[in-house]
């Protein structure tokens, strides 16, 4: 049976062309704003219509198979499972400026970054636009019980979003619609490990989300060791695309830099980083690594983080250190899924 969840209003109107148009609007509101997960819950539709919809369609959304809450109550990580058994992590972070949801875009990942748990078992499949949307709507429904909602979206969970471009784009447009969450593109951050042609596609689409590029090393040799994608798109190309994105959108690009003890956290690395980013409209977000059991990396010392930060800060680079969220709840992306699905 065809799943109605994930269709745009226009697609719903086409699908339900035998009904008056306002029915599609009602159904969209039930699906995306009112938390209905069955046609029977759509109480302003006639009994006959609900029975008819039940015969022709389904509403397929993921089930929660694990939930972990951080001790401070600020972070909740969900493991959501789709009808085919594929499971992804979705994270709710309660900031003082609002509630943020971090979604996955693929089941597993093929990018092979050396510090990442999500790629250990490779890529299973892409998520559809509807599946990505269902992660966000799930968290929004969850928050409704607290009289709250999703305020910002970060597309930074498992997967490389820009290799699932068409579905990502459809999801972002859908999320922007008034019949879903009506989320402004300015409240959305999309992360990439540096798929250069797709960054230019995003520029062409004129969807002014914040772009976040994973850099993690200030030279090609080290970056290639940490991120195999660097063999396809080297640093100067990635930085060129980042700069073009910032110029085209007027929005600062965020460069993510995971600090790994003894690997990329010295003052010399900071010096090189400041040099290659000089003059760019950007922020650097330093992320002391969450060690992954299966990987042999350790956290940088507090002193090394402070020194790295200070060097960039005093060399005209906008820099922040990522606030630690969810320590102790399998916080690094992919860890909860690995523990539940692969062990
Ligand atoms: S860091 Fe992101 S792109 Fe790299 S392997 Fe992990 S999920 Fe994939």
Image: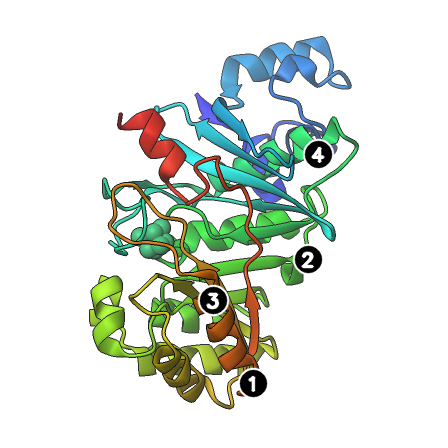
Give the labeled residue for mark 3. Answer: 303
Vertical placement of 217 versus 49: above or below? below
Task: Indicate yes or no: mark 3 CB to ligand 1 under 8 Å.
Answer: no
Crowding near pointer 4: few (<14 within 10 Å), some, many (20+)? some
Crowding near pointer 3: few (<14 within 10 Å), some, many (20+)? few
The residue depicted at 32 percent of the width and 50 percent of the height is 116
Task: Indicate yes or no: mark 4 CB to ligand 1 under 8 Å.
Answer: no
Q: Position of residue 14 (x, y in %)?
A: 57, 37
CB of mark 4 within 8 Å of CB of mark 3? Answer: no
Q: Earlier in the sequence, mark 4 or mark 1?
A: 4
Q: Earlier in the sequence, mark 2 or mark 1?
A: 2
Tag shown at residue 33: 4
SS state under label 2: loop
SS state under label 1: loop
Could you tell me how far apart the alpha carbons at marks 2 and 3 are, in whole angstroms?
38 Å
Front disc: 2 or 3: 3
Crowding near pointer 2: few (<14 within 10 Å), some, many (20+)? some
Vertical placement of 43 versus 302: above or below? above
Could you tell me how far apart the alpha carbons at marks 4 and 3 are, in whole angstroms?
47 Å
The residue depicted at 33 percent of the width and 72 percent of the height is 217
Front disc: 2 or 1: 1
Left or right of 243? Residue 293 is left
Q: Position of residue 326 (x, y in %)?
A: 53, 41
Q: Position of residue 218 (x, y in %)?
A: 34, 77
CB of mark 2 within 8 Å of CB of mark 4? Answer: no
Give the labeled residue for mark 1. Answer: 314
Q: Earlier in the sequence, mark 2 or mark 3?
A: 2
Query: Tell me, what colour scheme is on the image?
Result: rainbow
Front disc: 4 or 1: 1
Give the labeled residue for mark 2. Answer: 184
């Amino acid at each position: 049976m065809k799943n109605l969840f994930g269709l745009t209003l226009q697609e719903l109107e086409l699908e339900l062309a035998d009904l008056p148009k306002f029915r599609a609007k009602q159904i969209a509101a039930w699906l995306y704003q009112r938390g209905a997960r069955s046609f029977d819950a759509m109480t302003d539709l006639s009994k006959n219509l609900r029975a008819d919809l039940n015969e022709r369609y389904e509403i397929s959304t993921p089930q929660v198979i694990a939930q972990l809450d951080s001790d401070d109550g600020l972070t909740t990580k969900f493991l959501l499972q789709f009808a085919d058994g594929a499971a992804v992590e979705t994270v709710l972070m309660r900031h003082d400026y609002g509630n943020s949801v971090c979604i996955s875009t693929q089941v597993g990942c093929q990018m092979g970054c050396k510090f990442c748990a999500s790629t250990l078992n490779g890529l299973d499949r892409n998520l559809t636009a509807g599946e990505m949307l269902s992660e966000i709507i799930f968290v929004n429904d969850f928050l409704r019980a607290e009289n709250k909602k999703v305020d910002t979206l970060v597309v930074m969970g498992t997967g490389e979003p820009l290799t699932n471009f068409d579905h990502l784009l459809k999801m972002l447009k859908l999320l922007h619609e008034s019949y879903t969450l009506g989320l402004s593109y300015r409240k959305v951050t999309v992360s990439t490990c540096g798929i250069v042609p797709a960054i230019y596609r995003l520029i062409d689409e004129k969807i002014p989300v914040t772009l976040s590029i994973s850099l993690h090393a200030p030279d090609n040799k080290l970056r290639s060791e940490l991120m195999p994608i660097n063999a396809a798109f080297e640093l100067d190309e990635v930085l060129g695309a980042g700069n073009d994105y910032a110029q085209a959108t007027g929005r600062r690009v965020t460069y993510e830099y995971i600090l790994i003890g003894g690997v990329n956290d010295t003052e010399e690395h900071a010096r090189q980083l400041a040099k290659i980013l000089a003059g760019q409209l950007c922020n650097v977000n330093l992320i002391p690594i969450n060690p992954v059991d299966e990987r042999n990396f350790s956290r940088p010392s507090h002193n090394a983080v402070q020194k790295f930060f200070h060097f960039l800060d005093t060399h005209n680079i906008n820099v922040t250190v990522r606030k630690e969220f969810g320590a102790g709840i399998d916080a690094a992306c992919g860890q909860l899924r690995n523990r539940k699905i692969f062990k």
